[in-house]
Amino acid sequence: MIHILSVRYDSVQPVVADSGRVAASDFQACHYFAMRYTLRYKVIEQSIQRKRRRSEALALQMRDLDKALADIVAIRSQIAAGTAFRGYGPATMAATGAVALTTAILQFWLLGDPTGEPLGFFLGWFVAATLSGLMIWFEMRARSRRHHSGLADAMIHQAAEQFLPAGIAGVLLAVVMWKFAAETLWLLPGLWQILVSLGIFASVRSLPRTVALAGAWYFVSGFSVVVLASQTHTLSPWTMGLPFVIGQSVMAAILYFASGDNDAED
């Protein structure tokens, strides 16, 4: 008598069989196990394949979505590049000119010797520039939402992108000259005006063409201030204040006449 495995349903039980029936029973057991585990393998494999196909389909959809979003951003940027920016208001430009005039007058009264007090001189103009920048920024956001609607963010980004390099260069130039060449600080007012002119020229493609006149004014005044200051190597609130008063007034007038009656409604 030989012990063999008799498989019934999900249990495996030892039985005793004649040697003549061993071959048939053994074949049936092997056949059962083969069928059972082959089917289980196929089920598992099909499940894995379905999950893989779903993952690939999801990844493809995400790639398509990312491409569509990138295309939308590119289209919006192209439209913004071809649209005149109306975020700068004439009233705020005139107000920044008033800030420059007020700063020059205060420094004329309060600073007996600006050259001997460069920290007070440049700190005053830093505060004036910060105040003017905030005024322009807040009005730019409000006007862009009103005039450009869905393109507002793209238009603001484009405007900042055009002028930001000149602003950063002005700050870094002041820091480097203060740290390593303090005896040349008298050059800074003229150099700042030249940088402002470059920022305006960079913005001409999205502003009225006549804005280039304001850029030309800052360009000429910057070099003129450098030439005048080279004779005495001194700092003066008027060589900083008056060019900015005139330049910002010219900008305000250009924006006012370029925008027509619409700004009166704003």
Image: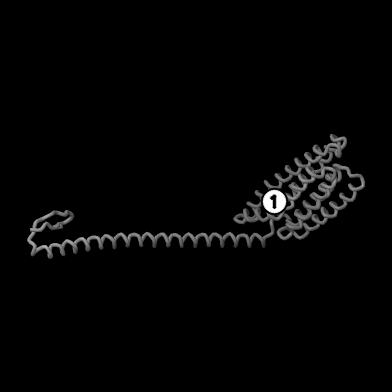
Q: Can residue 241 be spotted in the picture?
A: no
Image location of residue 102, percent across then percent down: 81, 40
Depth check: 199 or 184 in front? 184
Residue name at image x 15 percent, y 62 percent = 26
The answer to whether 258 is drawn above or below residue 116 in the figure is: below
Image quadrant assignment for residue 150: bottom right
Q: Position of residue 22 (x, y in %)?
A: 11, 62
Is 166 or 31 nearer to us in this picture? 31
Residue shown at the point (8%, 59%) measured from the top left: 17
Q: How is the image coloured?
A: one colour
> Is residue 148 toward the left or the right of residue 192 in the image?
left
Horizontal relation, residue 64 to residue 198: left or right: left
In the drawing, does residue 222 fall left or right of residue 65? right
Point out the image quarter for the N terminus. bottom left
Q: Residue 84: give x, y in percent of width and height.
A: 69, 59
Q: Which residue is mark 1?
A: 265
Whether residue 218 is visible here, answered yes or no, is yes
Question: Which residue is drawn at the image coordinates 87% and 35% (left, top)?
Answer: 112
Nearer to me, 236 or 169: 169
**Horizontal and vertical percent position of residue 175:** 76, 44
- Give the amino acid at mark 1: Glu
In the figure, residue 237 lies in which quadrant? top right
